[in-house]
Amino acid sequence: MDFRNVTNLFADQNFDGYPVMIKDVTEDDDISGTDDEVTDDPIVDVVDGGDVEFPTPEYPTVTGGGFIVAEPNPREKIRVDGVLVKVLNERVQYLGADGRIITESLKDYTKKNVIEKYATLETFLNSWKNADKKKAIVEALEQQGIFFEALKEEIGKDFDPFDLICHVAFEAKPLTRKERANNVKKRNYFTKYGEKAQSVIKSLLDKYADDDLLTIESLDVLKLDPLNKLGSPLEIINAFGGKENYIQALKELENELYKAA
């Protein structure tokens, strides 16, 4: 006789954890040997070392009759030092260049740091255009505390550092890498080159759209797909008349990519 309804606690995972096994029975079934039974589909998993690892489902529900029924659930398991935990909320924090936790939004923090270095959009554009390697600007901003990967997660993974900075710091409309590459293809400026050199430039545009500018800035890109299908790095460079001409063609391509529409 359960006058205080304490048996309801058996359905509460906070009281005695998740059930190791669920057995559907009726009032006429014999349950005297239940303690010795095993199941091929246990509710919990035993891992190396004998620890018990629980799944993280929705809480089990109780149906009429008082038998526990486990709802369908994902098999993701979260353990901290062998103890079952449940994620209630998630918060990501970043440390600024000064080592302090950033308390403002990522966008506000980025804008403030960029403007400290580039007061106006024109200043940033001139610096970007005149840089021998755009990688140097990106790395300098990263050292100043700009989190490009985090910005991509928040704004969009299809934008490169140039558009992330222009959009966040100066409220300019961003273009995806694919949009920029297609704009260059439409202008068809590269018809002045030979057939093979044109194929190289088109492949560089495709690589830029898939990866980013920092990838095509490196000569190592000539060893990657789809560039490596056009010949060896030396053969590709010779299609432009030598390394110096290839580098000049790459700079011209970069200027076309970031040319105002």
Image: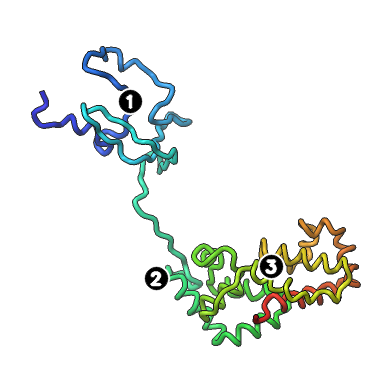
Question: Is 232 rendered above or below residue 97?
Answer: above
**SS state under label 3:** helix
Crowding around mark 1 (Cα neighbors within 10 Å: few <14, some 14 to 19, many 20+) is some
Q: Quadrant of the N terminus?
A: top left
Could you tell me how far apart the alpha carbons at marks 3 and 1 are, in whole angstroms? 56 Å
In the rendered image, the quadrant that contains the C terminus is bottom right
Horizontal and vertical percent position of residue 227? 80, 60
82, 193: nearer the viewer: 193
**Measured Cα–Cα span from mark 1 to mark 2:** 47 Å
- Tell which circle, 1 or 2, labels the residue nearer the N-terminal end: 1
Residue at coordinates 41% horizontally, 32% vertically from top-left? 51
Q: Which residue is mark 2?
A: 103
Residue at point 43%, 70% (across, down): 102
Q: At which x and y percent is residue 121?
A: 57, 85
Tags 1 and 2 in contact by the CB under 8 Å rule?
A: no
* Percent x, y of residue 145: 53, 72
The quadrant holding residue 46 is top left
Discs 2, 3 touching: Cβ within 8 Å: no
Q: Is residue 244 visible?
A: no
Disc 1 marks which residue? 22
Write the residue at 83% across / 69% down: 198
* 23 vs 207: above or below: above
Residue 214's mark?
A: 3
Which residue type does callout 3 highlight? Leu
